[in-house]
Amino acid sequence: MTSKPQQAQPIGVFDSGIGGLTVVRALVERLPHENLVYFGDTARVPYGPKSPQVVREYAAQDTDFLVSHQVKMIVVACNTVSSVALEVVQKHSKVPVVGVIVPGARAAVSATKKKRIGVIGTVGTIASNAYANAIRQFDASAEVIGQACPLFVPLAEEGWIDHKATEMIAKEYLFPLKLQKIDTLVLGCTHYPILENVIRTVVDGVTLIDSGKATASDVEQVLEEQHLRNPSRLKGNVQFFVSDIPYRFSEIGERFLGHTLGKVRRAEGFF
Ligand code: DGL
């Protein structure tokens, strides 16, 4: 079979900031030969508390940036954007677009036994009901209980992974979900996999769904179906772009990515 020219082109990934590096990590683990271009809108993060209208505007600009890098596919790593602006991304690009909501919802439905699923995310993600709607598309009888956990974002960035304060806050957020007898919990925010251990301690016995990991598996499937997989056997490269390089960027980024970041460029002419 002859290889299509776009197969060697990179997959574009974007997020409101650094958090999407947890999705990059999952993609690199699953698809080590793919090249990636990452854009994090670090100048305007967080998107979680912003109105859907503003998030849509930002999402359109983030998409245009990736399109200008000739990406063969776009992965919307940000749960907030995936919840309220996926169609904006689709409108602004001609390539396949994968968000994190549908893969996370599908993984939750296949994991739950009691059909009682908790979803945690930003205020915007939970208010949109995007996960609940997607879960019910897969199983109309599933019960979905949402909980916004906005303080998890700064705690993950601060690296307070084993901190008593994080455990107390996690208890405050997650006990109501425990009382609702959930057996599955979707980590519906890029930052939450960083706090996986403390979350697991608080909701002991509940299956945790990492929406980023679920998304990497969907991305693989789309690449297969559309014959877009990079045939190269070499390790893919990842280019990092951000709209600002804030204090402690590398330290935080490395925690999210799991290894050193390498070169990070400021997105030229983004504003
Ligand atoms: N990346 C965002 C998300 O997954 C979390 C950070 C933010 O609020 O922008 O929803």
Image: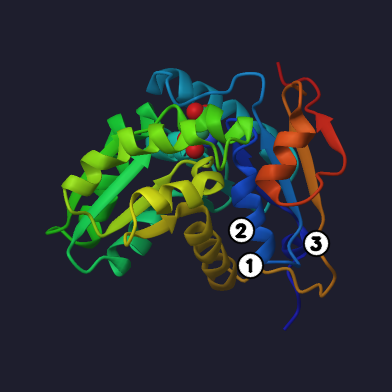
Instruction: Tell me the kind of residue under disc 1.
Output: Arg
**Residue at (52% x, 42% y) in the render:** 190
Q: Is mark 2 on a helix, strand or loop?
A: helix
Would you name the residue on which mark 2 appears? 26
Badge 2 vs badge 1, beta-carbon distance below 8 Å: yes
Would you name the residue on which mark 3 appears? 236
How far, Cα to Cα, is label 2 from label 1? Answer: 6 Å
Q: Nearer the viewer, residue 85 or 30?
A: 30
Instruction: Tell me the kind of residue under disc 2.
Output: Ala
**Residue at (72% x, 24% y) in the render:** 243
Other-residue count near label 3 (Cα within 10 Å), few / some / many at <14 / 14–19 / ≥20: some
**Residue at (41% x, 52% y) in the render:** 201
Q: Where is residue 25 in the image (x, y as percent from the top left)?
A: 66, 54
Q: Is mark 3 on a helix, strand or loop?
A: loop
How far, Cα to Cα, is label 2 from label 3? Answer: 14 Å
Look at the image and tell me whether residue 88 can be seen.
no
Q: Position of residue 216 (x, y in %)?
A: 55, 61
- From the Cβ of disc 2, is ligand 1 less than 8 Å away? no
Taking 102 as reference, is 45 above or below it? above
Q: Is mark 1 on a helix, strand or loop?
A: helix
Q: Is residue 219 left or right of residue 101?
A: right
Instruction: Tell me the kind of residue under disc 3.
Output: Gly
Q: Where is residue 98 in the image (x, y as percent from the top left)?
A: 50, 52
Look at the image and tell me whether residue 199 can be seen.
yes
Q: Which mark is residue 30?
A: 1
- Of pointers 3 and 1, the one earlier in the residue sequence: 1
- Of pointers 2 and 3, the one earlier in the residue sequence: 2
Q: Which of 50 and 69 is in front in this view?
A: 50
Q: Which quarter shows the C terminus?
A: top right
Taking 26 as reference, is 82 above or below it? above
Q: Which image quadrant is residue 93 in?
A: top right
